Image (cartoon, grey):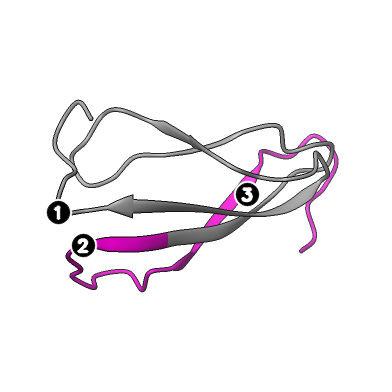
Amino acid sequence: MDNPVNARPVVMVTSPTPGSAYRGEILIAGTASDDEVVRLVEISIGDNISWKPVDTGLLTGYVTWSHTVNVSRESPGD
């Protein structure tokens, strides 16, 4: 993924498929890239305004990330 110097980070969700409906435990996954280092990726689910950090592994300019969530238990403020 080409990302010019001093560009904003780019984050993509690769799973689940946008617009899909799920119940129970699901894996949310994606990629993030920056011209320097990706230090943190956070996600918010649905109308939930509470952001959750996700594991990005090594601090590099391109990372894959994932987070497992139980959507049947998610509610605003969780």
Q: Which mark is residue 53?
A: none
Q: Which mark is residue 24?
A: 2
Q: Which mark is residue 10?
A: 3
Badge 3 vs badge 2, beta-carbon distance below 8 Å: no
Quadrant of the rendered image containing residue 41: top right
Number of the front mark, 3 or 2? 2
The relative height of residue 68 versus residue 16 in the rendered view (above or below) is above
The relative height of residue 41 versus residue 62 in the rendered view (above or below) is above
Number of the front mark, 1 or 3? 1
In the rendered view, does 76 fall on the left or right side of 15? left
C-alpha gap between disc 3 and disc 2: 28 Å
C-alpha gap between disc 1 and disc 3: 29 Å
For image coordinates 26% across by 53% down, the residue present is 70
The relative height of residue 60 versus residue 53 in the rendered view (above or below) is below
Q: Which residues are magenta?
A: 1-27
Q: Position of residue 42 (x, y in %)?
A: 49, 36
For image coordinates 19% across by 26% down, the residue present is 77
Mark 3, secondary structure of its residue: strand
In magenta segment, residue 60? no
Viewer-proximal residue, 6 or 66?
Answer: 66
Q: In which quadrant will I find the N terminus?
A: bottom right
